[in-house]
Image (cartoon, helix red, strand yellow):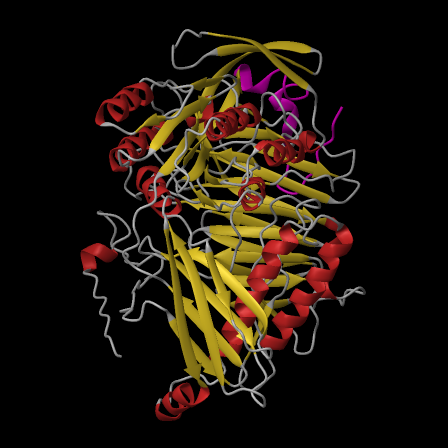
Amino acid sequence: MEAHVSFKPTVAQQRKCSNCSETAVDGELVVVYDVNREDTTGKLEVFNGYFVHFFAPENLEPIPKNILFVIDVSGSMWGIKMKQTVEAMKTILDDLRTEDQFSVVDFNHNVRTWRNDLVSATKTQTADAKRYIEKIQPSGGTNINEALLRAIFILNEANNLGLLDPSSVSLIILVSDGDPTVGELKLSKIQKNVKQNIQDNISLFSLGIGFDVDYDFLKRLSNENRGIAQRIYGNQDTSSQLKKFYNQVSTPLLRNVQFNYPQASVTDVTQNSFHNYFGGSEILVAGRFDPSKITEVESIVTATSTNTELVLETLSQMDDLEDFLSKDKHADPDFTKKLWAYLTINQLLAERSLAPTAAIKRKITKTILQMSLEHHIVTPLTAMVIENDAGDERMLADAPPQDHSCCSGALYYGSKVASGSIPSWANPSPTPVMAMLAVGAKPLESTPPPHVIRVENDPHFIIYLPKSQKNICFNIDSKPGKILSLVSDPELGILVNGQLIGAKKPENGKLSTYFGKLGFYFQHENMKIEISTETITLSHGSSASRLSWSDTAHVANQRVLVSVKKGRSVTLTLDKEMSFSVLLHRVWKKHPVNVDFLGIYVPPTNKFSPSTHGLLGQFMHEPKIHIFNERPGKDPAKPEASMEVKGHKLTVTRGLQKDYRTDIVFGTHVPCWFVHNSGKGFIDGNYRDYIVPQLYSFLKWP
């Protein structure tokens, strides 16, 4: 079988924007294909002591569904996210069959149901549900626990009363963009509540939207309850993503399928059910056998579809595949072995995430590590090192994600390492890293951390408070040329300062200011890093090097790693415990007002000393806040509330700021409570107290 794929984008399609002269094709070219399946028993491949069985029956009779849509309508869903969710739900409701039953649960700090019982998906009922959804106005907090328990109760009640078709499947589809803020807040308790109440015939699927959602929590929640989770970001087309997610999960996995391999020599059988790209359901089964005892594998498949039981038998011999492999020079003789290992590792990873004790988890982890090293498979627990032909240069291309309990949101990049060195995370006695520069190496970064402290635009400060799970924002109105202390930790010898630049001219009587230059000083490493909109300068003692924004580069010097992503961002990481990300914002050079500027993102961490201060640094040790008496504001779209913090009672306004990490042009909305008068009452003292004389001056706090 042979196919040719041609991808020839026009120059217009490659332009970064309609007015840009530069061209670039961003993203991945994904080719999705399927194969003809003429054999309903599936395909059984046997070779070299391993076998793989593909089973994907077609034209199965549709199974009736009982679906509870659980939709987050809290204030953070306001705007485009809610609009796209409504449009997607309208399309999904149109796709329901009359044999299906459904209802809608929407929640903020309260929980509402469109119908308290499941109803048939008639045209009248779906039309009424659409009207209900269209009238939703997002507001308030997020009570995930009560919403899920309400949905579970409706399905359990219907099942207990015998109102569900015995051949039907029951689904809960949760759509949310945030962590719980009302009701039960402890994630482990929510998991326990759901697990204790949900019946075994119900599957829970979760779709997380945006940065603020705890995706790991949604994955655990779904994996524990026979479902899957998926995440999309606010800058993506939420509507099409939600419809695609529904089409995937509403195709029931082939669960009632049993594979029997009668030969005693067949061992270590792994079975994985999954949805393919075409909305179908497939099963891959892999196992091992002793080729000295048998040369063929017999499979007996029992599959149940609605009220029909299907028994299929197939037999495969080693000679068939061996003959094929000998004729095709591109064939991999170990592919059955590798696929068996890959499926087994995936199954072990799923078991590891649900391990009831630490001892069992350690045992599973040890097995995964052994198999991944033996079969050369990259997993979340291992890393891949690429070596050149000469063997004198290596690139750490993928590494284990950071320990979130240590330092939320640190970014990890591929970087060159000395030949024979061991990554620090695998070595109990870390080896010092020599300074080196790797220009042109592709940076590999993890998903941007959802909860960070941000400074963007002119300048808008957005402070995320982890304990309160709130974003508090304020603006600083100062003058071009002034240098503001952002982070000042004299005890650890770490500072971050920013110098303001002004727009080309005032607008509406006000001259906007932005950060045009940032200075980072790591005193104990004797290292200074100056980032402007033009260049990145690194100084180590008396030596200095300069990078351009047109470079992609990595610099490692003792404890500091600097990674530059061409034309987009610089990330500084100290001991993998603290990280700072700087985003470059380019504007049209002939714009009459706007100028290029920088944004900075800092994940909260407890690694700074108690003496840390600065406009951002003071919030590394979170103050207690209390927000209450939420009420309509002068602008109906911006409610007001009272906030108690640091002995002050302030009036704050609900608003939206922007996070540009995944969409550098339009950004993603971040809801926050806005403190007026340059943060007065929320920050210590007055904003003028944070002005320092030089780019590398520590703040001298009164």
Exactly how many numbered labels are in the figure? 0
The residue positioned 23% from the left and 66% from the top of the image is 7
| Side (left or right) of 365 relative to 611 | left
Q: Quadrant of the N terminus?
A: bottom left
Q: Position of residue 644 (x, y in %)?
A: 65, 12
Is residue 592 inside the magenta stretch?
no
Would you place residue 264 above or below residue 542 in this image? below
Q: Position of residue 655 (x, y in %)?
A: 45, 21
Q: Is residue 417 visible?
A: no
Residue 473 or residue 476, whichever sits in front = 473
Residue 481 or residue 416, whichever sits in front = 416
| Side (left or right) of 650 relative to 367 | left
Q: Position of residue 320 (x, y in %)?
A: 39, 87
Q: Is residue 252 visible?
A: yes
Would you place residue 433 above or below residue 632 in this image? below
Rendered image quadrant of residue 666:
top left
| Side (left or right) of 29 relative to 681 | left
Is residue 690 inside the magenta stretch?
yes
Would you place residue 696 above or below residue 411 in this image? above
The residue positioned 53% from the left and 68% from the top of the image is 342
Rendered image quadrant of residue 601:
top right
Q: Quadrant of the C terminus?
A: top right
| Side (left or right) of 307 relative to 612 | left
Would you place residue 139 above or below residue 316 in this image? above
Q: Which residues are magenta?
A: 676-702
The residue positioned 53% from the left and 79% from the top of the image is 50
The residue positioned 77% from the left and 44% from the top of the image is 492
Which secondary structure type mostly characterizes the magenta part of the structure? Answer: loop
Q: Position of residue 508 (x, y in %)?
A: 33, 19
